[in-house]
Amino acid sequence: MKYVALLAFCAGLILAAMARAQESSPSGADKYALPPVSLVPITPGGGTPIEGKSKIGEEYEKSPEHIQAGKLLFSAMNCSGCHSSGGGGMGLNLMLPTKVYGSSIENLAATIAEGRPNGMPSFRGFIPMEQIWELAAYVKTLSVNPTDK
Amino acid sequence: MMEWNKGPAWYAAVFTASLLTSWAFFSAQAQTPPTFTNTNDDKEWTMPAKNVASTRYSSLDQINSKNVKDLKVAFTFSTGTEKGAEGAPLVIGDTMYVVTPYPNILFALDLTKNGALKWRYDPKPSPAAQGEACCDVVNRGAVFTDGKIIYNTLDDYTVAVDANTGKEAWRTKMGEINKGETMTMAPLLMKDKVLVGDSGGEMGVRGWGAALDVKTGKIVWRAYNTGPDKDVLIGSDFKPFYDSEKGKDLGVSTWPADSWQHGGGSVWGWASYDPDLNLVYYGVSNPGPWNSSLRPGDNKWTAGLWARNPDTGQARWFYQYSPHDLYDYDGVNEVILLDMDWQGQPRKVLVHPDRNGYVYVMDRTTGEVLSANPFQDITSSTGVDLKTGRLQYVAAKQPKVGETVTDICPAPPGAKDWQPSAFSNKSKLLYIPHNNLCFDTKELDVGYIEGTPYVGTEVHMHAGHGGNRGEYAAWDIANGKKVWAIQENFPVWSGTVVTAGDVAFYGTMDGWFKAIDANSGDLLWQFKTGSGIIGQPVTYLGPDGKQYVAILSGVGGWSGAIVAGQIDRRDGTAALGFVNAMKDLPDVTTTGGTLYVFAIP
């Protein structure tokens, strides 16, 4: 009977996430919206690349509660299926400080929401934006405090 | 977690086990390849397993145990890829064909001009497929038939390419990457059809095998490995040997509720074909998720072997190596078809070294297990009950939710994974490249999310008894025991070939390509290639009438994912726990696919 309970638990999590994804789109969209980000530090013609800093990013990055929530989501949303405990596998190594698609919390949130071409799924619509920020906050810690797993 | 201060001499040491006694024994009841393998076409190499009985034996003997020490590089070719090169080069006429891992480019090389590039064919697979492949983005090779080279792409197309021009003849979409399906196996030729199947046992797919018409690419049949009998192509022809395979819709009733719909059971390994019995044999992967507490029941038709009519797909028999698999013991390893005397009776048999650690000898007409003997230290089971056919699990090693169970042997990649063995018509031995790995595991909650892994365990693998992670063994089939074995530091993840020159070839994950005396197991020659070797060696006669040996070098695969996928060695759970056992691999090899071809000058 234990497995049935487990299944129900997991399914419940996903359903809840989907429901929240729908709720959060019309109202409150602004607060959690992704700022524009760039993926490279070079710009032609002497311009400066978009820094992409955001208030929400700063808030989530500093919040132990959001980081802890992100950690749970990392397993529940099956990031761990592809990225293991952060070291990578089917997905990229997230314990490296320099990320291919940018290592700021804003870049990480953009990666999770939009997906990336070599097989990173786009989670936009499947995970509500506020949880995407929580995930990004947790992913950030993987390279800041890497531990053996 | 392990010491490697013993030096190369230690792990390359050959130990000889009762060489003389077993020799006398098996020559009395020697097994032979079926007559349908006698084709006198050993000049060429037209399918990865050499023939439909999958013996990987060549009658060529210009290169032999006396002169192999003089082997030198004849030519090389860079495949331009950085992922694991598990493929077998093919040789047809004066041309060699090489399929790369993703992006699955097919190269044609001119053997009259030292392997000069003739043309290339690019199937342009979707880059997103890379995120759906569990264990590196490998491809295990192509098959030649009807003037075409036929193979599978990671993004689920079977493609046929004109062998002369490199033009695409047909392409058939077989699966959906969005559902976690990819394709990595080499097609098997069955007369006018090829058998293909999907990968994705770690992605909660509903696995299948299918036959395509080689002329048109039309799907002739597709048989699912879970679900109702009509989808599994079980009908009135189905005559399994054991009672536990009998009953209606077992592909539904041996699973809780609807969980068969994401029950894995993919077809990504090897297959063989008996044209006399008109049966095709192919294995089925592990059930999903790995977390076995979520799927009580036998989980038909996973972790077992099908015998089917290749024309209709109708099942003849099924045998489940690992009922209710607990450890990711896929049943997809090679099946070698042989004829032999079994206790005084002539039998058509198949020989299969399974992930679960036993070499099975089975009657291939009926599906009866004749013997099952261990080729690695096993703690997960005590043996196979020959009356019921059932694997006898050890209760103390059963994985649990939230609690770590330690020292389970073999580990998920098994005593042997995909790396195919070879049978020598001369020595009558089976040459088995394999692993020596154990693991610790804990089951975790997991829910199915389409297109993402469906595993639910935390795994840490480590070296098995003795500390060597791999072994190359010569196996006495009739007596079910090792004649000799070469211990290797890393898992022996390459295939092997054995020849009438009494030499066997294989490669190591630190890049050595080795020639072994097929009788004694002595190392006769070795060459250090540019990267770790996980490919399949082949041998052929060149346009100049000389014998050549070819191998792809290029580390990766599940075992080499730490290097090919640049995985962080601090995360032992990565690559489904394989990283824990391979933390030193990045210290000895880098990526890069290169074809090496050798000859005696």
Image (spheres, helix red, strand yellow):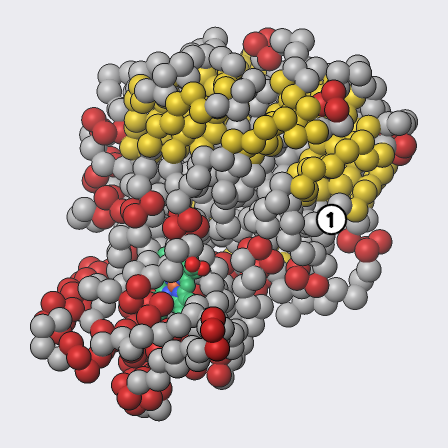
Q: Decide if residue A10 is in sight here.
A: no
What is the quadrant of residue B417 in the picture? top right
Q: Quadrant of the N terminus of chain B?
A: bottom right
What residue lies at 53% left-to-right and 51% top-to-bottom? B558
Question: Is residue A110 something that shows in the picture?
Answer: yes
Residue type, label 1:
Gly
Q: Which x, y percent locates residue B223?
A: 30, 28
What is the tally of numbered marks visible in this picture?
A: 1
Indicate whether B413 appears above or below B238. below
Q: Residue at position x 80%, y 25% from top?
A: B502
> Would you say B230 lies left or right of B501 here?
left
Name the residue located 90 percent from the left edge and 32 percent from the top edge: B70
**How would you rate the neighbour count of disc 1 (Cα within 10 Å): few for under 14, some for 14-19, many for 20 or more?**
many
* Residue B116 against residue B467 in the figure, above or below: above
The residue at which mark 1 appears reads as B530
Label 1 marks a residue whose chain is B
User: Is residue B254 shown left or right of residue B533?
Assistant: left
In the picture shown, does residue B106 fall above or below B287? Answer: above
Give whichever of B190, B458 is nearer the camera.
Answer: B190
**Along the line of sight, the residue nearer the viewer: B161 or B156:** B161
Where is residue B299? Give x, y as percent: 30, 43
Give the secondary structure at mark 1. Answer: loop
Residue B133, image x and y in percent?
43, 49
Q: Is residue A59 left or right of residue B56?
A: left
Q: Is residue A74 above or below residue B147?
A: below
* Side (left or right) of B128 relative to B135: left
Residue at 63% x, 9% y: name it. B38
Q: Quadrant of the C terminus of chain B?
A: top right
Q: Quadrant of residue B169?
A: top left
* Residue nearest the observer in this picture, B357 or B546: B546
